[in-house]
Image (tube, rainbow, N blue to C red):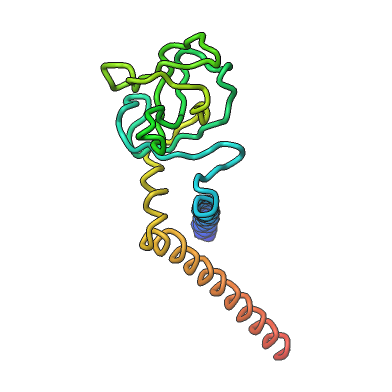
Amino acid sequence: METAVAKQFGALTATRKVVRLAGQFLLGFIMLLMAVLVFSLLQSRIAGVPAVAGYKIYIVLSGSMSPAFEAGSVVLVRPIEATALQVGDIITYHDPDPEKAETIVTHRVIAVQPTDPVSFITRGDANDANDPLPLPAANLIGRVDFNVPHLGFIFSFVRTRMGIILLVIVPAVLIIATELRKLMGYAQALEREKQLEGGT
């Protein structure tokens, strides 16, 4: 009987440890996500384009590069010399059309033109035709090295007032409340120990 009870107690203790570790992992993940989101939000407000570890972060707004990545994805763009680009690379650049100079485009290099300086023919993977204008090297922002599906929706949402409240302020309050509860528990435990010591 005692052995069975001991086994149950051991299993319960192990379960609690797993739950505690899972909770700590989740808390760490939330804090990391909050830090990245807050950093990106502040940087985008200051510099215009968020960047992490040398990569500029852009949100894909259309499906022109499907199936490589869909609208709502985030692409990480690394600055690169135009002469280092090859056919097949996916690049991000300012639209060469003077009337759309503020538009940022992410398409694939279809051909490299040996002009001086070099220029490129580009096309979206989902498009039937090449882009209408060659891309001058001066318009290049960088090459896409990574993409993260759907993360763009979160980045877009966190820039709104409701997004800041739900994804930054609320988790921060919950974390603070959890830590305060732990501190109160420790304080109560210390008080009980003092009372027990005083009673002996």
Q: Is residue 159 above or below residue 140?
A: below
Quarter location, residue 124: top left
Q: Is residue 95 above or below residue 35?
A: above
User: Which residue is at the far bottom?
Assistant: 199
Position in image of residue 174 (x %, y %): 47, 67
Nearest to the observer: residue 94 or residue 16: 94
Nearest to the observer: residue 3 or residue 47: 47
Position in image of residue 19 (x %, y %): 49, 55
Q: Is residue 82 above or below residue 101?
A: above
Position in image of residue 118 (x %, y %): 53, 15
Question: Residue sitting at 41 percent across and 16 percent down?
Answer: 121
Nearest to the observer: residue 17 or residue 78: 78
Position in image of residue 163 (x %, y %): 38, 58
- Is residue 124 rendered to the left or right of residue 4? left
Question: Residue sitting at 34 percent across and 38 percent down?
Answer: 61
Query: Which quadrant of the figure contains the C terminus?
Result: bottom right
Can residue 95 be seen from the camera position used here? yes
User: Which residue is at the far top?
Assistant: 114
Question: Residue sitting at 43 percent across and 38 percent down?
Answer: 74
Q: Is residue 101 above or below residue 125?
A: below
User: Which residue is at the far front?
Assistant: 98
Nearest to the observer: residue 125 or residue 195: 125
Can residue 10 be seen from the camera position used here? no
Image label count: 0
Quarter location, residue 170: bottom left
Question: Residue sitting at 42 percent across and 61 percent down?
Answer: 164
